[in-house]
Image: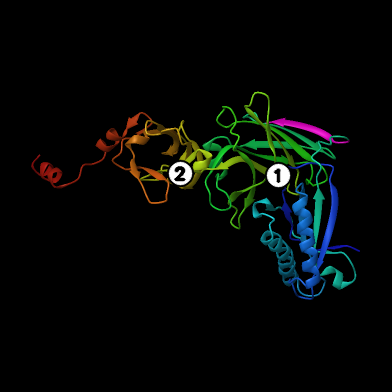
Amino acid sequence: MVKKGLILIFVLFAIGFGFGQKKEQVIFFFETNSYSFSASETKKIDSLIAVLKQNKKYYLTLEGNTDKTGSKDFNKKLAQERANAVYQYLIQNGIQNHHFKFVGDQNIVYISNDDSKNRNTILHIDFLDFKFDTSNKTESTIESTNGIKVTAYSNGTSNLSINDYYSAENMINEGINAIDVDGNVLKSDGMFQICDQEKRLDETGEFYLVKMPSRSEQVIDTKMTVWLDIEDEIGTVLWKQTEIEITTDETKKFYLLKVPKTSKKCIRINLDKICIFKNNCETFYVATFKNFNFKDIRIPEASFSAKINDSLFVFTKDLNKSILKSTLYGKIEMNDKETNIHFNIKDCKLIRKKNKPKEYFLEEKSPYTIGNKKYNEILKSKPKKGFFTWLKNLFS
């Protein structure tokens, strides 16, 4: 009899994703109240690692389990520690960390009435053959406002919805940044979210085919890779790199990729590259002397990556592009009304710090325009202060 309680699930996304999997599982056993490997279990996991390194087309699911003794909270922690013990051993022995993604609900599964058999971590292995097996699959297609076309192949009916985040306005509104789990700034060429409202998604050969245009509306960037979202403990969306394969259409203006459905109802996908010199990318900051409450912010020669706080924003640009002649355009809320703001980057104060990206700081004395009103006009409308103003008022 199977009873449900708490499971810690990790998924290892391997090189590309294929379908028509061969499924295997390996069970690692532990002593009572322990998450340490015995000699026999260490030998077992070492043999598994050797197999995984020879067969790179797979993904893994880890379940940490306990027996029925102990409190719910104690068993939950112990189940997590057992799953993490296997996870950490795989990491330390050559299974790279960026392949792993936490995706699961938390349940404890008792596989036997024998308590000794329930003190385990179950490792499910799906070996992939990279075939597009669409037989006996239901096909559903949807297209986003920015031209991302998604076709879902499912074992049942689908009710798809898609949201894309191609603009800073979309990203700011949704609170989504292009920052990875290690804090690196990413240059995004498009991010989106697919949801299937019909049912929970699973890993039984169901998948999405995605055709998406470049965010820059130009020829695609071959250095882009696929990233999936992870939310930290406070709900911040971060990105983790996968090795899902990207191909292109004949025009070289669309990315083509296949993404497996997961146990999550919705999945966020981002095409990114880490913004570093070897990727022909440079990061820079734009800061303002006050919070203008930006609803949208853009620099035509650059790509928006993140809102750090209400007055600090992160952009990326190609190394061969200069922004000194660029203008920043934004939408702000002022007096309960939305209005436009713009200023020239060259009019900002350039701040350089060792080993830090350049920062362009809009000072209070810098020229900028809100609506049709320029900074100097705003300044003139302020009451003048100082000794000479006082003296002039005294004798006028």
Q: Main secondary structure of the magenta part?
A: strand
Identified at 84% across, 36% down, the residue is 133
Residue at position x 91%, y 64% from top?
1
Is residue 142 in the magenta section?
A: yes
Farthest-out residue, top: 251
Q: Nearer the viewer, residue 158 or 254?
A: 254
> Sequence order check: which comes first, mark 2 or mark 1?
1
- Residue 350, image x, y percentages: 34, 42
Where residue 42 appears, x then y in whole percent? 77, 68
Residue type at mark 2 is Phe
Determine which residue is flagged by label 1.
Answer: 266
Q: Is residue 89 in view from this perspective?
A: yes
The magenta span reads: 136-143
The amino acid type found where label 1 is placed reads: Cys
- Is 87 positioned to the left or the right of 125 in the image? left
Let me know if residue 158 is in the magenta part: no
What is the x, y in percent for residue 266?
70, 44
Residue at the extreme left: 395
Which of 13 and 195 lies nearest the eye of the viewer?
Answer: 13
- Foreground: disc 2 or disc 1: 2
